[in-house]
């Protein structure tokens, strides 16, 4: 019998109810949002992680880290390469926390 799998959204909906999980998730929300956008665009372009890595001159494990939301110190140059390879346009902005 095949094990039942859960999709990310249904699992997140359940876990977000936990106070500690929600605080950690909120702290990483931007990373997760970017990761989900990259995965969506990569799949839409029918690219594997390896294909994308070759297009931008990096390694497949680097793309895997990026898609996990666990990639630190992204440069604008890297984001621009990524956007070009995915036929996308980066939109970067800062929003005040006080407004």
Image: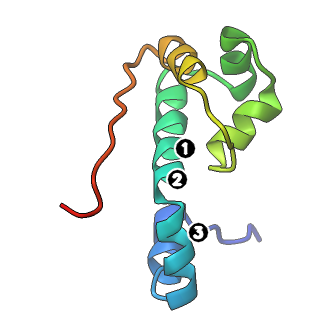
State which quadrant residue 97 falls in.
bottom left
Tag 2 secondary structure:
helix
The residue indicated by pointer 2 is 32
**Which residue is drawn at the image coordinates 51% and 78% (left, top)?**
23
Front-lying residue, 58 or 10: 58
- The reply, left or right, for residue 44 in relation to residue 51 is left
Residue receiving disc 1: 35
Disc 2 vs disc 1: Cβ atoms closer than 8 Å?
yes
| Residue 35 image offset from top left, x and y in percent | 55, 44
Identify the residue position indicated by label 3 in the image. 6
The alpha-carbon separation of the residues under discs 2 and 3 comes to 18 Å
Decide which of tag 1 and tag 3 comes sooner along the chain: 3
Residue 53 tag number? none
Q: Is residue 19 above or below residue 80?
A: below
Q: SS for tag 1?
A: helix
Residue 31 versus residue 11 in the image, above or below: above
Observer-nearest of 24 and 1:
24
Which quadrant holds the C terminus? bottom left
Display coloring: rainbow
Give the residue displayed 76% in from the left and 19% down from the top. 58
Coordinates of residue 1 in the picture (x, y in percent): 77, 71
Q: Could you tell me which residue is drawn at 32 percent across and 37 percent down? A: 93
């Amino acid at each position: 019998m095949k094990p039942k799998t859960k999709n990310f959204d249904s699992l997140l909906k359940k876990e977000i109810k936990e106070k500690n999980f929600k605080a950690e998730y909120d702290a990483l929300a931007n990373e997760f949002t970017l990761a989900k956008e990259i995965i969506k665009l990569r799949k839409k372009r029918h690219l594997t992680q390896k294909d994308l890595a070759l297009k931008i001159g990096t390694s497949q494990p680097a793309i895997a880290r990026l898609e996990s939301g666990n990639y630190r110190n992204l440069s604008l140059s890297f984001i621009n390469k990524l956007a070009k390879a995915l036929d996308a346009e980066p939109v970067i902005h800062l929003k005040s926390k006080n407004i």
